[in-house]
Amino acid sequence: MKNLADLQAIKEKSQNEMKAHSTRVLVGMATCGIAAGAKPIIEALEEGVKMNNLADVEVSRVGCIGLCQYEPLVEVVKEGEDPVTYVNMDVDKVNKVIEKHLKGGEIVEEYTVSGTALT
Amino acid sequence: MAMKKCSLPFAGTDEQEKALMAIIDKHREIPGALMPVLQQAQEVYGYLPIEVQDIIAREMKVPLSKIYGIVTFYSQFSLNPKGKYKISICLGTACYVKGAGEITKKFQEKLGIESGGVTPDGKFSVEECRCIGACGLAPVIMINDDVYGRLKGTDEEIADILSKY
Amino acid sequence: MSCIQTKSLRNTVFYKKQERVALRNCGYIDPEKIEQYIGVDGYQALGMVLTDGSFTPEKVIEIVKASGLRGRGGGGFSTGMKWHLARTIIPDADQKYVCCNADEGDPGAFMDRSVLEGDPHALIEAMTIAGYAIGANQGYIYLRAEYPLAVKRLEIAIGQAKEYGLLGKNIFESGFDFDLEIRLGAGAFVCGEETALMVSIEGNRGEPNPRPPFPAEKGLFGKPTILNNVETYANIPRIILKGSDWFTTMGTEKSKGTKVFALGGKINNTGLVEIPMGMTLREVVYDVGGGIPNGKKFKAAQTGGPSGGCISDKNIDIEIDYDNLISIGSMMGSGGLIVMDEDNCMVDMAKFFLEFTVEESCGKCTPCRIGTKRLFEMLEKITSGKGEMEDLDEIEQLCRYIKKNSLCGLGQTAPNPVLSMMSNFREEWVSHIKDKKCAAKVCVDLLEYKILADKCVGCSLCKKACPVDAISGEIKQKHVIDQSKCIKCGVCVNTCKKFGAIIKE
């Protein structure tokens, strides 16, 4: 990268790439998330997306989302909509989310923050 | 950190020494290189015996006393090797009253080492720890992650436990 | 039971009350992909500063000064002023350094870890901008070895930045060179202190040095150096891009911007939050933190870890900022905020913090090395039921002596928890001494385990479990604990869960 124009080009390319998928699935992979079991979860998501040919879905590791009490956290971000925050996840729950939400478009409400004591 | 004399004679291999020299060479021109050199040397040997400190002092032209001062200052550096199986004997109150002191002595006799030391083959190291919260099972010891409770401290019992490893 | 209808964290009170500046990218981008950082305006600030001729180093320093950004490691010194001094005290120094304090030694604090693991490029960009501002071309990040993931992510990020030409020679073809190196800590809390940190990078025991001279004049390797905390740096790219005026719209008059807190202890929503300065402690504990679990009562919140003080219920409406916290005997600290409830003992907590500082004292100066040890022994006297009223005055005197005479911040602040907890909870301390009672039922030596005669059914489970045979009684007869034998391990209470006949008081 040489100059600001180059930087701008990379920025645009990155933004287009982020938009290329209509859905981003974010998995909290800071130390707290990993200690709570996020690694098998992100693997299950990547596997599930591949197996089901969900070309529209991008699975991404992210840093600390902040709600350590409820790790492992998975957020499903669809453009134009509020992100859906799944809490206290495990591999079984994730598989259900892949089936119902990512494939079927139906949010699994009981796994989201609305099922917690968070206000 | 207890300043116990290391009971395991230094058994550094040629390979380890080669690795150490490579680390030192890589850092010769770098200012303040002592810390990274010591950290990487500990990764090679598992601890920092005086023999390794000596090599570093000689090669980096720093007094051994300075290296020793650094190694004893930071809690990450260890002068003593840990065994493959780390025996932690709980000396919390409940365990102590139930004879943990005696049990410590028995382990020391059986393995021929003192607390903080390690057996010549590097298999077992013995150390004391504070309450691990299993007072109902007092006296308690841990070997790596295995917990053994309600010990009687007899010779057969100790031999039996050690034979599992 | 759900209290909210929303399925999104972003709509919760926990999230909405926050203002994420330092944490803006954490939880949003992949920290191991530099393109994603660039996609959210990453490195734009650096690009602007290096290519736009109007952004002289002096102008950059002015912007940081005008923003009001103060050191987020806890000291609260004006960041812009620090950079200005490093630039101007020895303007023609042949070498200057930019350092980052990523040691984060306070137990209970993980703000910096989250930035390093979630948005490492923000730190790299900020340090490069700082280098340009003060005239340094070399930076060091002193990173705690106990954070292996942070080390890994930072190493990846530095590698990527170098690959993209954002670190190294002639960045953005401006003629400005800057390089960054990671130096790992080795398990010494005192190396979070400015001068000790630099001495550690130089390859020595981490023993602090007296100041003056300050690092801006004579720091790392004897050269002018700035040392800032990770969170301080994390704010810089945003301040440069959006301007100092924007930053001043948040916070209080003397404490601009936001602060990241690691909420822990007796609180419902433990986690990492970033709030605007000036939010009250009440809002942090009850709105963002979700209140105290199990219906317990708030007792105190500790800020500043082993260097800080507690904020009791009477000050719960305090607006959190640097000066307000100091005025009540606490301090901002690096951001650890531990909440305590009625089941925590304020003598025991003071002893806990002091035990840590005694262990971590480097030993160089007598007031700290010996003073904190003696102080700890005096607290042990009180928690073991041997305290006398004169001890309270002696403790206070010793605390003030240690604060006044210690060489560095560790010793100067070690007595803070003691002084603060003693003044806010004096009755509790007096009760430990006069009545030999610990109301919170924590100090073991002041407790008695009793079997309630009207609840005991004589099942003998407790007698069998007792490791010291302190319980006597026949089957189906009331059992009794011999207090002279009891070692207060509490095992008997666990065996009597069914009948609840054993209590501690």
Image: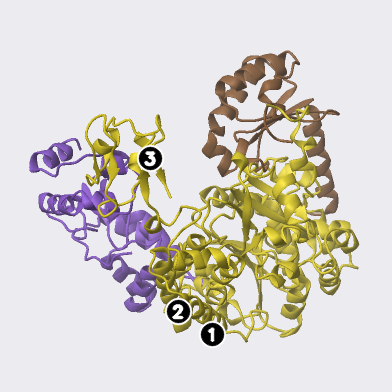
Which chain does the purple colour mark? B
Q: Amino acid at mark 3?
A: Leu
Mark 1 vs mark 2: which is more N-terminal?
A: 2
* SS category of the residue bearing label 3: loop
Location of residue B108 by image quarter: bottom left
Q: Residues within 10 Å of mark 2 (few under 14, many from 20)?
A: many
Q: Position of residue B13 (x, y in %)?
A: 25, 55
At horizontal 21% and vertical 66% (from top left) the residue drawn is B5
Residue hosting label 3: C452
Q: CA distance from mark 1 to mark 2?
A: 10 Å
Q: CA distance from mark 3 to mark 2?
A: 44 Å
Q: Is residue C336 left or right of residue C251?
A: left
* SS category of the residue bearing label 2: helix
Residue hosting label 2: C371
Q: Position of residue B94 (x, y in %)?
A: 27, 49
Q: Is residue B36 left or right of residue A96?
A: left
Residue hosting label 1: C405
* SS category of the residue bearing label 1: helix
Location of residue C222 by image quarter: bottom right
Q: Position of residue A54 (x, y in %)?
A: 70, 18
Can you see residue C310?
Answer: yes
Which chain does the brown colour mark? A
Mark 3 vs mark 2: which is more N-terminal?
A: 2
Q: Position of residue C89 (x, y in %)?
A: 73, 85
Q: Residues within 10 Å of mark 1 (few under 14, many from 20)?
A: some
Relative to the observer, which residue lies in front, B56 or A5? B56
Q: Amino acid at mark 2?
A: Gly
Q: Are marks 1 and 2 in contact (CB under 8 Å)?
A: yes
Mark 3 vs mark 1: which is more N-terminal?
A: 1
Which shade is chain C? yellow
Can you see residue C337?
Answer: no
